[in-house]
Image: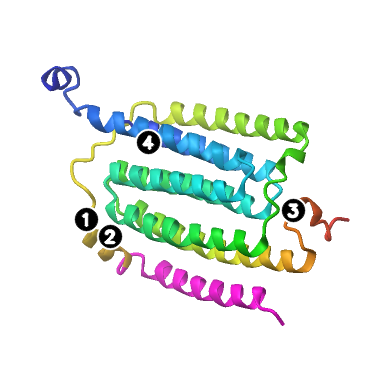
Amino acid sequence: MLLNQFLLLAAVLFCIGVYGVLVRRNGMLVLMSIEIILNAVNINLVAFGALTDNVGGEVFALFTIAVAAAEVGIGLAIVLLMYRNRRSIDLSEADLLKG
Amino acid sequence: MSALFAAVSTTAPIFVAQNVFFGIIALLMIVSALKVVTTSNVVHAALWLVLVLAGAAAQFILLGSEFVAVTQVLVYIGAVVVLFLFGVMLTRASMGDDETVASEKRSMAAVVAALLLAVMSIALIDSFSDDRLVIDQPQLVTTVADSIFSQYIVPFEAVSVLLLAALIGAIVVARKD
């Protein structure tokens, strides 16, 4: 197997995630797109770890998984709070900090 | 057949079956990811996300990282997706109003993503054109564990504190006063 096939797959997934973050207005769907981006990064880390036969790639992928779990928890709490205050999770309506 | 391949490339063997499975799984992941970012139903998006995450776990298996694959299934498919479904349930998320997104904004985002992909692909192909992965045996769990608890002990403890802080923060943010 070539290293590049994994890296290109991760690049495609990353760009799909970026498209989702830019297009989606539902807060929940934006969080799901961020998950896709983080997974692309994980594939990169594990592929480089396999290339250099180094366990560090896997360890950092595990750390990324832990951080992603924490991020989803906080993100969903924020979305729930937003829903409670405004009865909507449309991110384009959240412009309180707009100048 | 394998003798032919061995004669062609004397340095590293070509694993045909693994490449075929890589292609199938990669195609599945890309289609599912596109569905996640385009479908108008939030619950369907969460279920397509399960396919993307499972495909990533399969790629980890192909790369010989069993422990990361198992953790991916446990944490992502087991916990994160359930969390998403609970979030959808609690917010009664107005089912996909995304048809109202201006097509101009949509096409601009597509252009940004395509340009990003082009730049990254050129850089990757230029840098790692023919680097081969030779995975003759999976990475042992004991190796990962020894590494985490010796070389990476400080980041590990930091992640523990981060998880605790996230737990407390989520409770504080979402609590009804």
Q: Which residues are magenta?
A: B149-177
Callout 4 amino acid: Ile
Callout 2 amino acid: Val
Q: Is residue B126 magenta?
A: no
- Residue B134 in percent (x, y) is at 24, 37
Residue B96 horizontal side relative to residue A9, left or right: right
Please, which chain is the residue tagged with disc 1 on? B
- Residue B166 in percent (x, y) is at 55, 71
- Residue A57 in percent (x, y) is at 36, 51
Whether residue A12 is visible, yes or no, is yes
How many numbered circles does the render carry? 4
Q: Tag 1's secondary structure?
A: loop
Residue A26 sits above or below residue B18 on the image = below
Residue A79 horizontal side relative to residue B75, left or right: right
The label number, if any, that marks residue A91 in the structure image: 3
Earlier residue among tags 4 and 1: 4
Instruction: Same chain for labels 3 and 2? Say yes or no.
Output: no
Question: In this orientation, which residue lies closer to the viewer: A88 or A46?
Answer: A88
Q: Could you tell me how far apart the alpha carbons at marks 4 and 1 are, in whole angstroms?
A: 24 Å
The residue sitting at the right extreme is: A99
Callout 3 amino acid: Leu
Please, which chain is the residue tagged with disc 2 on? B
Whether residue A11 is visible, yes or no, is no
Q: Would you name the residue on which mark 2 appears?
A: B144
Callout 1 amino acid: Leu
Q: Could you tell me how far apart the alpha carbons at marks 1 and 3 are, in whole angstroms?
A: 44 Å
Q: Are marks 2 and 1 in contact (CB under 8 Å)?
A: yes
Q: Could you tell me how far apart the alpha carbons at marks 3 and 4 are, in whole angstroms?
A: 33 Å
Q: How packed is label 2: few (under 14 Cα within 10 Å), some, or many (20 or more)?
A: many
